[in-house]
Amino acid sequence: MTATRIREPLKANFSDQTKQEMSKIVLVTGATAGIGEAVATRFAAEGYDLIVTGRRDERLQEVKRKLESEYGHRVLALNFDVRRKEQVQANLGNLPEDWKAVDVLVNNAGLASGLNPIQDGDIEDWEKMIDTNIKGLLYVTRTIAPGMKERRRGHIINLSSIAGKEAYPNGNVYCGTKHAVEAIGKGIDPVAEKQAAKAALLAQQAALKRCSPL
Ligand SMILES: NC(=O)c1ccc[n+]([C@@H]2O[C@H](COP(=O)([O-])OP(=O)(O)OC[C@H]3O[C@@H](n4cnc5c(N)ncnc54)[C@H](OP(=O)(O)O)[C@@H]3O)[C@@H](O)[C@H]2O)c1
């Protein structure tokens, strides 16, 4: 996972005062399942309003209902495919006025598809992973980051993987996409990882919670 600080490090200890001082909109891509849903739930528990996205609208509406009823915060559900830049722009480039000031972007939507030696690789799998994990992340970031820059605040958390640090046998293309995610994060702000360690930790904890029966 890489996390990029646009201005101030996210405070993860969340005292009441801190909560008030922090603006409160988080956008989580791919929140219909897995880590994205867990991260959205954790941010809701910490008092954030949420923009949740995904392609499965029924599932998305279910997540919205659950977060609204359990945590009582505003939830905006946006149904689109991050691989389609016109859909990304139509949904995120035209956010309602009271949703525009996104404080935290969690680029989570992503997948691993296929595990083949390179000579047997399925090109459709490759395209799916490259288009989602790299290009989708870039389309979303390109749409949201200008507002952060203008407001001089915001955090971008990119879901990388151990696969972004090491390549494992036959993980060729997936590992390639996650190495790209790492490089993109570092390229946005070379000192980001250290400064945003707490933000990364927060997302990691949510992921661990999801994986652990405890
Ligand atoms: N699970 C792990 O062990 C693990 C480890 C390291 C890193 N990661 C990374 O963590 C992220 C989440 O993984 P996960 O295991 O939680 O996956 P998951 O359970 O399969 O969930 C993936 C989420 O991404 C969304 N998504 C996928 N393709 C999309 C697209 N084209 N447009 C919009 N949304 C899309 C899915 O929503 P819809 O299907 O509704 O669109 C779903 O909400 C990924 O980036 C993955 O590479 C996972």
Image (cartoon, rainbow, N blue to C red):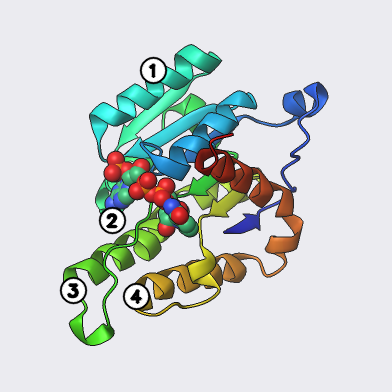
Cβ atoms under marks 1 and 3 closer than 8 Å: no
Give the residue at mark 4: 173
Residue 18 at x, y = what percent? 79, 29
Circle 2 sits on which residue? Answer: 83
The CA distance from mark 2 to mark 4 is 17 Å
How many angstroms separate mark 1 from mark 4 (CA)?
Answer: 36 Å
Q: Residues within 10 Å of mark 3 (few under 14, many from 20)?
A: some
Q: Secondary structure at mark 2?
A: loop
Q: Is residue 88 visible?
A: no
Q: Is mark 2 within 8 Å of ligand 1?
A: yes
In the rendered image, residue 41, in percent from the top left (x then y), is placed at 52, 30
> Label 4 near label 3: C-beta < 8 Å?
no
Residue drawn 65% across the image and 65% down it: 189
Earlier in the chain: of badge 1 and badge 4, it is: 1
Camera-side residue: 135 or 199? 199
Mark toward the start of the polypeptide (2 vs 4): 2
Residue identifier under label 3: 122
- Disc 1 designates what residue? 65
Type of residue at label 4?
A: Val
How far apart are labels 2 and 3 at the CA level?
Answer: 18 Å
**Residue type pointed to by label 1:** Arg
Callout 2 environment at 10 Å: few (<14), some (14 to 19), or many (20+)? many
Q: CA distance from mark 2 to mark 1?
A: 26 Å
Name the amino acid, label 2.
Arg
